[in-house]
Image (cartoon, rainbow, N blue to C red):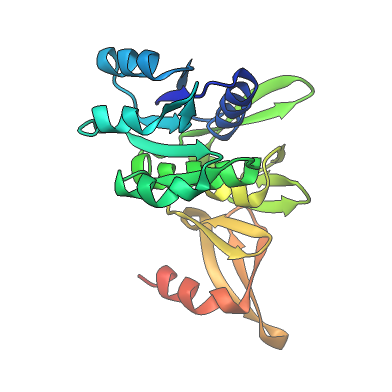
């Protein structure tokens, strides 16, 4: 994935780059930063990109000039600008999202998630990186039985072990394929490893997993989940 940041303030550019790297930490990406329109146009003339993150005030020049010149190119654009009054104009250029400055990490992540759904929805993640005691290890996505919320973290349950992941359930859900389903506010399951759906007393529901564990199912999720399992 190739990403171009066009931002004339180095501190903000570094922050955007850092947050983009964090969001796409499990997906290879190359990030390039330029600070003015001329450098942006030169780079875009010689390089193909997937995503443009564009400020609208570049040393007093109008960032829209980049879109006017490169309007026929096949990349997606997210505007990051303090000029929120220009949002309507931005969408006339077909931009994917408009993130108003000052922005939070959560807001930028929402914009990146929208891009991900548009662009990489079919390029499914193969592995997750697990950080533990300063070391990195990898687990195969297809080996995950289910994922359980653990505060700001998540417990990854495999066939015979579990591992702590540093992303919460909401962030992990954005990285997973359609075989992973949110069945409860605290659980995501891999339908491949579901043995059966069980109705317990008191209107409670559980999924029996192949690793021998039982996962609770919210009442609001039961009907849709049942219909999906019997297909």
Image quadrant for the C terminus?
bottom left
Please tell me which residue lies in front, 62 or 217: 62
Q: Is residue 14 visible?
A: yes
Please tell me which residue lies in front, 110 or 130: 110
Residue 67 in the image: x percent, y percent? 31, 32
Residue 218 in the image: x percent, y percent? 63, 73
Q: Is residue 29 visible?
A: no
Relative to residue 175, is residue 92 drawn left or right?
left
Question: Is 4 located above or below residue 100 in the figure?
Answer: above
Relative to residue 155, is residue 143 drawn left or right?
left
The residue located at (64%, 40%) in the rendering is 102
Image quadrant for the N terminus?
top left
Residue 16 in the image: x percent, y percent? 58, 29
Residue 168 in the image: x percent, y percent? 68, 47
The residue located at (51%, 24%) in the rendering is 7
Question: In the displayed image of the protein, which residue is found farthest to the left?
Answer: 72
Question: In the displayed image of the protein, which residue is found farthest to the bottom?
Answer: 202
Picture mark count: 0
Relative to residue 43, is residue 133 drawn left or right?
right
The residue located at (36%, 47%) in the rendering is 89
The residue located at (32%, 29%) in the rendering is 65
Please tell me which residue lies in front, 203 or 50: 50
Question: In the displayed image of the protein, which residue is found farthest to the front?
Answer: 60
Relative to residue 95, is residue 174 drawn left or right?
right
């Amino acid at each position: 994935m190739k990403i171009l940041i066009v931002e004339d303030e180095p501190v903000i550019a570094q922050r955007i780059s850092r947050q983009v790297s964090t969001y796409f930490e499990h997906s290879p990406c190359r990030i390039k930063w330029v600070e003015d329109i001329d450098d942006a146009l030169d780079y875009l003339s010689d390089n193909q990109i997937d995503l443009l993150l564009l400020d609208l005030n570049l040393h007093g020049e109008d960032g829209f000039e980049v879109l006017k010149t490169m309007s026929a190119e096949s990349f997606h654009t997210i505007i990051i600008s303090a000029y929120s009054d220009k949002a309507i104009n931005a969408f006339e250029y077909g931009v994917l999202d408009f993130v108003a400055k000052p922005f939070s990490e959560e807001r930028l992540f929402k914009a990146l998630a929208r891009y991900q759904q548009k662009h990489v929805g079919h390029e499914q993640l193969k592995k997750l990186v697990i950080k533990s005691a300063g070391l990195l290890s990898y687990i195969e996505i297809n080996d995950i039985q289910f994922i359980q919320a653990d505060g700001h973290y998540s417990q990854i349950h495999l066939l015979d072990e579990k591992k702590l992941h540093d992303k919460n359930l909401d962030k992990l859900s954005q990285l997973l394929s359609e075989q992973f389903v949110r069945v409860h506010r605290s659980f995501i399951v891999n339908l491949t490893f579901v043995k059966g759906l069980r109705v317990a007393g008191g209107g409670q529901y559980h999924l029996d997993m192949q690793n021998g564990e039982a996962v609770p199912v919210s009442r609001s999720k039961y009907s849709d989940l049942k219909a999906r399992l019997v297909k």
